Amino acid sequence: MKLSSILTSLAISAVSVLFLSAATISQADPLKVGFVYVGPIGDHGWSYEHNEGRLAVEKKFGGKVKTTYVEKVPEGADAQRVINKLASTGHNLIFTTSFGYMNPTLKVAKKHPKVHFEHATGFKRDKNVSTYSGRFYEGRHVAGLIAGKMTKSNVIGYVASFPIPEVIRGINAVSIAARSVNPEVKIKVVWVSTWFDPGKEADAAKTLIDQGADIIMQHTDSPAPVQVAEKRGVWALGQASDMTAFGPKAHLTAIIDNWAPYYISRTQAVLDGTWKSGDTWGGFKSGMVLMAPYNKAIPKEVVAMAEKARIGIIDGSVHAFTGPIKDQSGKIVIPAGKVASDGMLAGMNFYVQGVEGKIPQ
């Protein structure tokens, strides 16, 4: 063989080795998964449970993934900046975990068509944007039944964040369930216009107790309302995670947002190359919504009633919004024998009977 031929063969071999090495390195690179949280991961509520899901992803996949999170990101322009930074730094799967991140997520997704985006609680999708949420109203139904039986004053106080359908839906689910076992129940609502502000949440809880509420519920993220209930000697139901530790005597139960299975499945889909845009709305049946342990102070027959309802929701024999249901004006919005459609639930913008006040505009 001529020297020139030998050199050529060596050169080709060297190039082949380089390409193989590069391919091996590329295959070994972990999938970068980003998470954006509206509150601190120590809120012991919404963001805390999303972060528990992130940690479950790390535990499941080990070195195959590398996760990043950014906490306390305001909804709006700042969210778009944070999401864009994650997309620009190699994150191929990004979970944006608050309703107000919807439009910022869509805008960033258009700039990064090869990145997979998952938006929590939103309703707008794209080729590379999926949406997901929990049927929290199922948990509110169970909580409402318990509250209706446990109240003595017949006033349930509700600390609410923002007047979006998800929150309104939860308030209505509580009212319907509570009044089904105690027709005298009234729901008083204080809107705090924030997801996480322990001071505002505590003040709202105090106001509601001063107005006669002996049960405090919430759709905000800190355990402050539970802590106030504990100090004031009334009952409380937590939000998003088990808040028993913050009010051992007061805490009746809580809705737990169990994101881990969804986060693991969507990460696996990206790794497998099978990810597709879609919408997921999971509840008790899928395990996306769970109930925290029941307080031992709840009578056994009330626990049995709550569990019967929870199991009924799973097997389809119970629906939280079963007619006849009337709005505040007395108009029938869901006829007898019918249940609310997902479309009605997703866009709910009215109060049912039993809820006092008006929805902020």
Image (cartoon, helix red, strand yellow):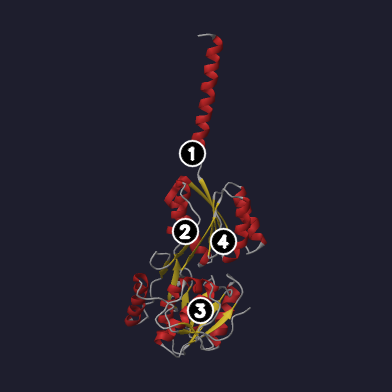
Report the residue that reaches farthest toward the right: 77
Q: CA distance from mark 4 to mark 3?
A: 24 Å
Q: Residue 111's spot in the image, x, y percent?
A: 63, 51
Q: Are marks 4 and 3 in contact (CB under 8 Å)?
A: no
What percent of the width, then of the height, locates residue 195?
58, 70
The residue furthest top is 2
| Disc 4 to disc 1, C-alpha distance | 29 Å
Give the CA distance from mark 2 to mark 3. Answer: 26 Å
Residue 333 seen anywhere in this rendered image of the structure: yes
- Mark identifier at residue 27: 1
Q: Nearer the viewer, mark 4 or mark 1?
A: 1
Q: Which secondary structure lies at badge 2?
A: helix
Nearer-N-terminus badge (4/2): 4
Mark in the foreground, 2 or 3: 3
Above-or-below relation of 82 to 192: above
Q: Which mark is residue 254?
A: none
Amino acid found under the numbered disc labelled 3:
Ile
Identify residue for label 3: 171
Question: In the image, what residue occupies the spot 63% across and 57% down?
Answer: 107
Q: Label 2 to label 1, Cα distance in Å?
A: 25 Å
**Which is more toward the observer, 206 or 148?**
148
Name the secondary structure under disc 1: helix
- Dot placed on the residue nearer the N-terminal end, 4 or 3: 4
